[in-house]
Image: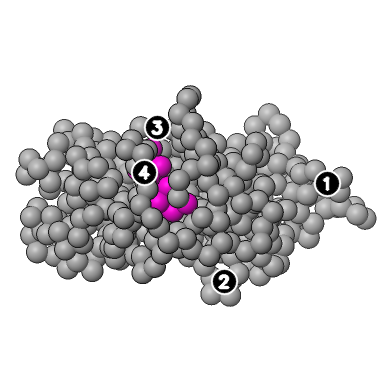
Amino acid sequence: MALPQHPVEALVRQHLAKESELLDGSHCKLAPEWEWVDVCHAIARTAVAPEHQLGERPLAFFAMEKDYPESFNGYLLITDRRMVGRWPRLNGTFGQVHLRYAWVTAVKQEKGMLSNKLKVQHANQVIEMSFGPYCDQLKAFFDALLTVPPEQREPMPYGLPNATAEDPTGALGAKATLIHDDPRTVFLLDYLHQANAHGQMPPDIAGDLTTRLVIQHRNESCGRGVNDGSWMSPLGRDDLSNVLVALYQQPLHHVEDPHRSLTFDSRNKVDKLLDGLDKVAGAADLAADVFSLNAGGIAGAAIGAAFGPKTINNFTALMMDTGSFCSFRLFAGNQPLSQAEPWLAEDVCRTLERLEGAMVLRRCAYGWGESVQNLLNVPLGDIVQRFSGVVGEFDARVLAA
């Protein structure tokens, strides 16, 4: 089951997706002629991201650059709820754009010899945008948007799952909020519902894992989400910490107060962890390499080739558990990693996404009773058998869907 198309999505397609410089990234599936950029990766580089707690969906990502740059100067992330990004000023600074569709009341275009600007009345303030020749397209979109009543310009929020008396895990309701057809997530949601119904998993644990599954689904579908300016991971803080350490080896620095902070050298990345990795195998081979922050230790791991010549190699992950997900930020010194080294920020987020999917799968099978080390040692056949004990025989290929 997939969410229905909202009227604003039709306006985006009509007015903003017809020019080659504007990527039609609906559901983050690329138009064939635009293989040079992936919306999910652009989000990692710009740190402009959807709010997964509302079910926000990116529809398109616009970049003024025609080639894949180290960082984007002028860009817009266009979602089903808002338009957010920045535009470069002549003095080297940037103008910020953050527009909620429901709050737009008027738009005016000003053309001059050296400038082409839009002034958008947004609630009680005027937001200026200067995207050169692309302002004509943007003006047409806003004119069309203003013909839609404000209360109809944004879809209803699709929040994170809620438990009810009829749906104690929230898993059945969660299926109705999936952004696109996702057989793997549907299977796991059904498994959690049945595991609870059969008395094999308490409702609080099954409900917690349901929320993590939905966050993982949205991260994979729409790019990594944000919560109060921090990235969202479906893993708990300890699981995320162990995955990071397995990837980049023992931290250079480790701080616990007030929040966990781990600093890594990206050149220590263990590439073999990704060899043959898919959503079924997940982290099957991590067990020999995983470092436990509680036990303190790491087995010998083969070091992958260093990244290419980069000016920044070290990065810090600042992590905090936030309900059924972990909020984290990536820094290079005191600067956000997406600004200091966009390429590295993209690589970290992309690699984590693959491992997060594997870890969420294993937590669904075994809950929270197993340590990370034991969980990663479980043979894949045992995981399939674990699911079969609840749902009966099934085609295990759905786990790789």
Q: Which residue is mark 3?
A: 322
Q: How many marks?
A: 4
Kindly give the residue lying farthest to the right in the view shown: 113
Q: Main secondary structure of the magenta part?
A: helix
Q: Any mark on residue 35, and which?
A: 2
Residue that extends furthest to the front in the rendered view of this protein: 300
Question: What's the mark number on residue 180?
Answer: none
Whole-Å distance between the Cαs marked 4 and 3? 27 Å
Q: Amino acid at mark 3?
A: Thr
Residue 375 placement (x, y as % from top left): 24, 49
Q: Is residue 245 magenta?
A: yes
Mark 4 packing: few (<14 Cα in 10 Å), some, or many (20+)? Answer: few
Look at discs 4 and 3 and give the one toward the viewer. Answer: 4
Residue located beneath label 4 in the image = 297
Which residue occupies 47% across, 25% down? Answer: 257
What separation in Å lies between label 1 and label 3 (alpha carbons)? Answer: 37 Å
Q: Are marks 4 and 1 in contact (CB under 8 Å)?
A: no
Picture quarter with the N terminus? bottom left
What residue is shown at x 38% (from left), y 55% (from top)? 300
Residue type highlighted by circle 4: Gly
